[in-house]
């Protein structure tokens, strides 16, 4: 049942290409994006003037990524908020607000309460969920299911990639309804998404190298993660995986924030994992991150860099280089997250921990 692995989590990491592919399946028909249980009229989709994304933990990190895509494709303002904070601060919600609630289990109490609060304020709710018929989709106006199969490992892996994929579907559906993307552009983006599972498969081939690097750092007391733009939520997710699985202190930063404080943490031998943007994307992002790596390396950090294949500019600054295939900027997180999952799992196993059942954690958090 663990597919020849010692742990479900390792099997679930390998199931990610299929999870992304299944999540896309059937969502593009006769030249249009279609959602699952869409009880929202086209008119409503067209008339939203604001989007909130609410979620917890890894699902929140997926939500942070939704913002980049939805704002870019639809020109709608998007706020992303931890579900546990959302309803305690009187967020501005009304009939023309779309609230996207992301939950693998569909039973997370914080997220469920955020959904209820949104509905009381007359906002419309779209759930992204991995569990058919769970409470959150039942109480929502529309659902996009992440079809990656049940996730057994407590740490979210394949659900995370599937959530990112589902977010993009929602973004494209909104862009289509609002006319901010032409049908052929929507079709092209969908086509590029459909090409992602094969690329995720190729990233999985880096596993032996990532594990080897992870074992070298299994005794570290802290690991920092840096990214910019869509690489920033990936950095947060990488740090969360390491905390929950390896019980190691880890923190993710927006690389630009380094000089506003965290750079004081850099000392000789400190491992820093850097998620590099594509050199073919926005050049300024790439060059800024390059200078961040240079800075931390000059201060003695051990740099582990995830970069696009053929990006030779990073080589001088990477003590360890993990190469991932080229992908459109917005979709790179589907690739760059995978080595971070493998890294955390390997550090945890080297330290002798049960990666399917980390201490103090439950798969479904049904208390607030
Ligand atoms: C991290 C993890 C948790 C969940 C969070 C939300 O690996 O699994 O942070 O992402 O508890 O759970 P769901 O998505 O079920 O609402």
Image (cartoon, rainbow, N blue to C red):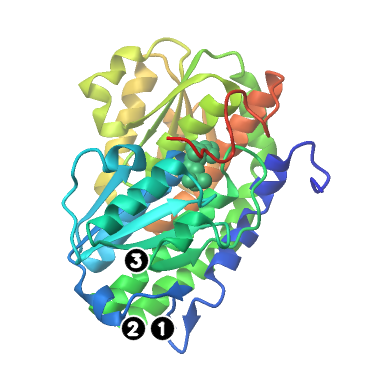
Question: Is 188 on the left or on the right of 88, as rendered?
Answer: right
Q: How many marks?
A: 3
336 to 359, vertically: above or below = below
189 to 65, vertically: above or below = below
49 or 112: which is nearer to us? Answer: 112
Whichever of labels 3 and 1 marks the residue nearer the N terminus, that label is: 1
Q: Quadrant of residue 300?
A: top left
Q: Are marks 2 and 1 in contact (CB under 8 Å)?
A: yes
Q: What's the distance in space between the residues labelled 3 and 1, CA to CA?
A: 13 Å
Position of the C terminus, as image quadrant, is top left
Residue under label 1: 32
Whichever of labels 2 and 1 marks the residue nearer the N terminus, that label is: 1
Residue 200: image location, x then y, percent: 58, 55
Element assignment for label 1: strand
Residue under label 3: 171
Q: What residue do we see at 28% from left, 45% from top?
A: 285
Residue under label 2: 183
Question: Is 181 on the left or on the right of 214, as rendered?
Answer: left
Name the front one of labels 2 and 1: 1
Q: What residue do we see at 72% from left, 46% from top?
A: 11
Q: Is residue 281 visible?
A: no
193 or 146: which is nearer to us? Answer: 146
Q: What's the distance in space between the residues labelled 2 and 3, CA to CA?
A: 13 Å
Q: Quadrant of residue 246?
A: top right
């Amino acid at each position: 049942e663990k597919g020849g692995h010692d742990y479900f989590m390792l099997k679930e990491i390998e199931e990610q290409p299929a999870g992304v592919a299944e999540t896309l399946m059937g969502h593009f028909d006769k030249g249009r994006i279609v959602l699952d249980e869409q009880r929202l009229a086209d008119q409503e989709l067209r008339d939203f003037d604001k989007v909130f994304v609410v979620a917890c933990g890894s699902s929140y990190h997926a939500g942070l990524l939704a913002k980049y895509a939805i704002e870019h494709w639809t020109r709608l303002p998007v706020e992303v908020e931890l579900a546990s904070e959302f309803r305690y601060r009187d967020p501005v919600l009304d009939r023309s607000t779309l609230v996207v609630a992301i939950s693998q289990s569909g039973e997370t109490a914080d997220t469920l309460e955020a959904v209820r609060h949104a509905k009381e304020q007359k906002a419309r709710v779209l759930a992204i969920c991995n569990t058919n018929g769970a409470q959150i989709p039942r109480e929502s106006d529309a659902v996009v299911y992440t079809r990656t199969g049940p996730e057994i490992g407590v740490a979210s892996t394949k659900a995370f990639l599937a959530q990112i994929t589902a977010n993009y579907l929602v973004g494209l559906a909104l862009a289509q309804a609002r006319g901010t993307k032409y049908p052929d552009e929507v079709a092209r983006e969908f086509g590029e998404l459909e090409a992602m599972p094969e690329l995720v498969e190729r990233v999985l081939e880096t596993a032996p190298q990532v594990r080897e690097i992870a074992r070298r750092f299994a005794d570290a007391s802290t690991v920092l993660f840096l990214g910019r733009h869509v690489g920033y939520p990936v950095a947060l997710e990488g740090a969360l995986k390491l905390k929950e699985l390896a019980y190691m202190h880890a923190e993710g930063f927006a690389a630009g924030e380094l000089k506003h404080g965290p750079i004081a943490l850099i000392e000789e031998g400190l491992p820093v994992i850097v998620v590099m943007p594509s050199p073919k994307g926005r050049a300024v992002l790439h060059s800024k991150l390059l200078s961040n790596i240079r800075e931390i390396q000059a201060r003695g950090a051990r740099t582990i860099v995830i970069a696009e294949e053929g990006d030779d500019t990073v080589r001088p600054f990477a003590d360890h280089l993990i190469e991932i295939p080229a992908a459109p900027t917005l979709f790179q997180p589907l690739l760059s997250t995978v080595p971070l999952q493998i890294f955390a799992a390997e550090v945890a196993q080297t330290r002798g921990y049960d990666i399917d059942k980390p201490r103090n954690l439950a798969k479904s958090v049904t208390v607030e």
